[in-house]
Amino acid sequence: MTMARTPELLDLQDGFRLRPVSKAILSSVMEAYVEDPESAKAALPWLRNDRDITRQLSDMLHDLEHLSNADRVHFWSIHDDSNSFIGLIGLGDEMQLIHSHYNLGYWVRKGFRQKGIASSSVDAVLGWLNSRGDTYRVEITVHPRNIAGLITAERIAAYLKLRIYELEEQKARRTIAFGDCLLYTSDAADEEDSVD
């Protein structure tokens, strides 16, 4: 596999663009978090209520910016043509399967949902990954209460013509799409150190 920096992906549907994540968007990410903390926590289930949210998001952006230069992760901020922050999408390194290369995650702000932005962004990211010329296994992990995320993940699986299998295991629902995608939903984050 060839090493690559996270590129800017332009000309998405309706003038949206993906820019490599940087610490400079912290205030926009915080604003999005404050407007809808529940969906932010569903998309970023590791966020802890008993710790400073600003610090956690700042650390995340710092780490993502640093790791993207090493080709371990690739994360983008989604912007419209007026440069408004719309959300995040990325290829992370927290996988459930040994042979996976990346985990795909996305989060779209409340006022921009149900407009095809997540699907268009996913297409751009997977198109870029495909253009690298190697074969990658990508997992999609969605919190079971993240309904919009589940819908987007199911659309991706349908678009790629993947079969979806659902298994019930204790308190976690696991949905596996065989092929080059794995969709895994788990509420395990709720059980770990959660403070309400």
Image (cartoon, rainbow, N blue to C red):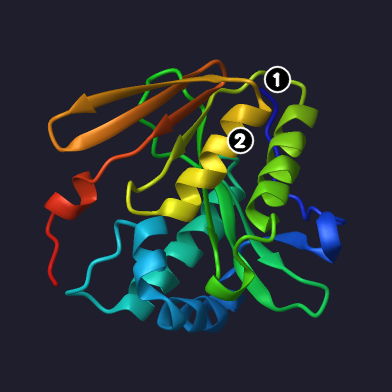
Measured as percent of width and height from the top left, residue 58 is found at: 43, 73
Q: Is residue 110 above or below residue 163?
A: below
* Residue at point 34%, 69% (across, down): 38
Q: Quadrant of residue 54?
A: bottom left
Q: Quadrant of residue 12?
A: bottom right
For disc 1, the marked residue is 134
Q: Is residue 40 above or below residue 116?
A: below
The residue carrying pointer 1 sits among few (fewer than 14), some (14 to 19) or many (20 or more) residues within 10 Å by Cα, namely: few
Closest to the observer: 21 or 109? 109
Measured as percent of width and height from the top left, residue 2 is found at: 70, 27
Closest to the observer: 76 or 82? 82
Q: Which mark is residue 108?
A: none
Measured as percent of width and height from the top left, residue 190 is found at: 18, 54
The first of marks 1 and 2 along the sequence is 1
As drawn, is 89 to the left or to the right of 58? right
As drawn, is 14 to the left or to the right of 89? right
Q: Quadrant of residue 83?
A: bottom right
* Residue at point 60%, 23% (across, down): 136
For disc 2, the marked residue is 156
Q: CA distance from mark 1 to mark 2?
A: 20 Å
* Residue at point 14%, 52% (across, down): 192
Measured as percent of width and height from the top left, residue 117 is found at: 69, 57
